[in-house]
Amino acid sequence: MRNKTLVILWAAAYCLCAALSFFPSPEGAQHKALVLLALLFFLPGGILLYRAIRAGNRVICRRIRLLSACSLALTVLAIIGNFLTYSASASAGMVMHILLVLVSVPMVCGQVWVISLFLWACLLLTSHRYLRSAGNAC
C-alpha cells in the first residue's frame, strides 16, 4: 500500500470519526464498534510513521509530529474552552463542543478519551525521538 493511499485512508477515518462523534451516547455493540474505530483511526498514521522512520523520511516524520502536537494542544484548549462556557449560552457550548470534536478526532467518537490522547502522544513522541536522534530536532 502506498503512502498516498494511507494518507487518504487516514483522512477518511478522520471524516468518519468526526461524523460519528455527533451521535448520542451509543451503548452495547455500537459503543464497542466506535471504540474499535477510534483505535483503527491511528493505524494509517502509525504505518506512515513506521515507514518514514525505516526510510529515513524526515518530512513525513515532521508532518506527523506537527499533526499530533497540534491535535493534543488544540484538544487541551478546546477542553478548557468547554469548561469556560459552562455558564454561557447553549449555543456557545455547542460551538465549543463542535470545535472539540473537530480538533480531537477520534477522542469523542471512541468515548474513551485516554486512549485517543495516549495514541496521539505516542505518535508525537515517536516522531520527535526519531527526528532528534537523526540530528534534526526542529
Image: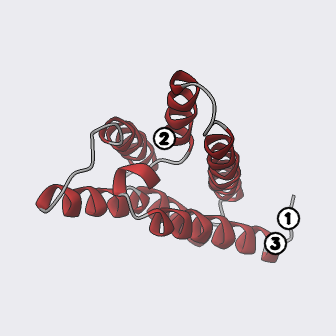
Q: Residue visible at 73% across and 68% down?
A: 128
Camera-side residue of 60 and 96: 96
> Is residue 67 shown to the viewer in this render?
no
Q: Secondary structure at mark 2?
A: helix
Q: Residue visible at 30% across and 41% down?
A: 20
The image's mark for residue 101 is 2
* Quadrant assignment, res 54: bottom right
Q: Secondary structure at mark 1?
A: loop
User: Which residue is under mark 1?
Assistant: 137
Are the residues flagged by discs 1 and 3 in contact, CB closer than 8 Å? yes
The x and y percentages for residue 66 are 70, 51
Q: Amino acid at mark 3?
A: Arg
The image's mark for residue 132 is 3
Q: Amino acid at mark 1?
A: Ala
The x and y percentages for residue 110 are 35, 57
Give the Cα distance between marks 2 and 1: 30 Å
Q: Secondary structure at mark 3?
A: helix
Q: Residues within 10 Å of mark 1 (few under 14, many from 20)?
A: few
Q: Earlier in the sequence, mark 2 or mark 1?
A: 2
The x and y percentages for residue 12 are 35, 39
35 left or right, relative to 50: left
Are the residues flagged by discs 2 and 3 in contact, CB closer than 8 Å? no
